[in-house]
Amino acid sequence: QVQLVESGGGLVQAGASLRLSCATSGRTGSTYNMGWFRQAPGKEREFVGLINWSGGATYYVDSVKGRFAISRDNAEKTVYLQMNSLKPEDTGVYYCAASPGYYGPRVYSPHEYQYWGQGTQVTVSS
């Protein structure tokens, strides 16, 4: 089993920054990819970005590229989502998820992620 726990969400004003954490436990090997998703009220869950365990390569959706950054701490087995210049449209519940390596290094669909955290709320006011 793989367990994921998100934290760090909150209520901030537009232009502020937040750093979300995803603490992992279980058998997440170097071939796993760690993704971040978000779900706004009344909308479907959407892909935000990912990081590869093996080399730390990252990928982001266009709407957050240049504002968000994903990193990892191997010692703490934790993945981070640094969010800068937050906008009201960034509001939603943010989830971290783990995808096994056999899906490849670029996985954008929620269906390709096997394990999920409980989510943490991010609210950006204008």
Image (cartoon, rainbow, N blue to C red):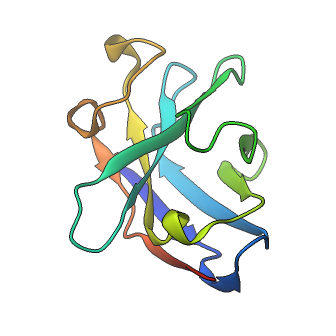
Seen in the image, is 68 located left or right of residue 99?
Answer: right
User: Where does the image place residue 42, in percent across and percent down from the top left?
Assistant: 21, 71
Q: Is residue 1 visible?
A: no
As drawn, 110 above or below 58: below
Q: Quadrant of residue 9?
A: bottom right
Image point 79% across, 73% down: which residue?
16
Q: Is residue 65 above or below residue 10?
A: above
Image: 52 above or below 34: above
Report how many numbered discs are placed on residues in the image.
Answer: 0
**Between 63 and 59, which is closer to the camera in this rendering?**
63
Give the quarter of the figure containing the C terminus: bottom right
Residue at 65%, 64% in the rendered image: 20
Residue drawn at x 53%, y 63% as measured from the top left:
90
56 to the left or right of 10: right
Residue 1 place in picture, x, y as percent? 32, 47
Position of residue 25 measured from the top left corner of the image (x, y, whole percent): 51, 53
Q: Residue at x 71, y 83 (%)?
A: 13
Q: Is residue 9 visible?
A: yes
Of residue 114 and residue 45, the one placed in the foreground of this image is 45
Give x and y (percent) for residue 107: 39, 23
Of residues 33 and 120, the one drawn nearer to the viewer in this rendering: 120
